[in-house]
Image: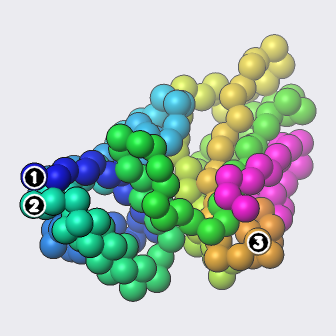
Amino acid sequence: MSVRNFILGVINCSKVSDVNDILSQYATEAKDTPSYIYFSKQPIDTNNISNDVIFFKITAENDTLLNKQVENLINDLNNLKTDYVLRDEKTGEFLVTVKYGGQVAIKFDNVKFLKKDTYKKIDGLKYTNTKYGYCKGFKPNFRPLEGKSAKNLEILPEIIYITSDSEENLLKLSDYVSKKVKEIDPNLETEFKWFFR
């Protein structure tokens, strides 16, 4: 008997149900898990995020049949027309990955006063879908109180993960997010970092 364990990260949360329907045809065991457990080290309030990483196992009589099942699974997932990350849990090998991904870090270094609803507006950005691509982000467990001075506070950056179908659109999405952040507070700074290129 051949067994392989996989981790599947779904970029577009609305596709999780469709992905699970496909996995049910191949996986002997599957478990939805919030993605921060696998992709982030920051403490997260699990009540505010959806389960968008799936740990699953495929078994077959031999390696040849197992590899064929994995190939068929990938073909079926590709037909969903959504980006995803598929990783072999044992080897760490990425079998499929989003073509273009990155993150926009929102920094508070120049913020002297935390305006009311700053975090609410930032959280709204974390679930933005545009013609350029998708945004994704999580709420940390700790944030300083708004409506107070930010002087002498060390405020951790807020992270927005972005993904797109082309390098050009990813850069446009990064610019879009950065402009929206400046609308929230012109003193907020943003920094873009590539994940996949």
Instruction: Give the CA distance from mark 2 to mark 1.
Output: 5 Å
Q: Nearer the viewer, residue 83 or 89?
A: 89
Query: Tag 3: residue type?
Result: Glu
Residue drawn 72% across and 26% down?
155
- Label 3 sits on residue: 167
Looking at marks 3 and 2 on the same chain, the residue that comes earlier in the sequence is marked by 2
The answer to whether marks 2 and 1 mark residues whose Cβ atoms lie closer than 8 Å is: yes
Residue drawn 69% across and 28% down?
156
- Label 1 sits on residue: 1
Decide if residue 17 is in sight here: no
Q: Is 189 within the magenta?
A: yes
Classify residue 86 by image quadrant.
bottom left
Query: Tag 1: residue type?
Result: Met
Q: Nearer the viewer, residue 180 or 28?
A: 28
Q: How many marks?
A: 3
- Label 2 sits on residue: 61
Please give the range of residues in magenta: 175-197
The crowding category of the residue bearing disc 2, from other C-alpha atoms within 10 Å (few below 14, some 14 to 19, many at least 20), is: few
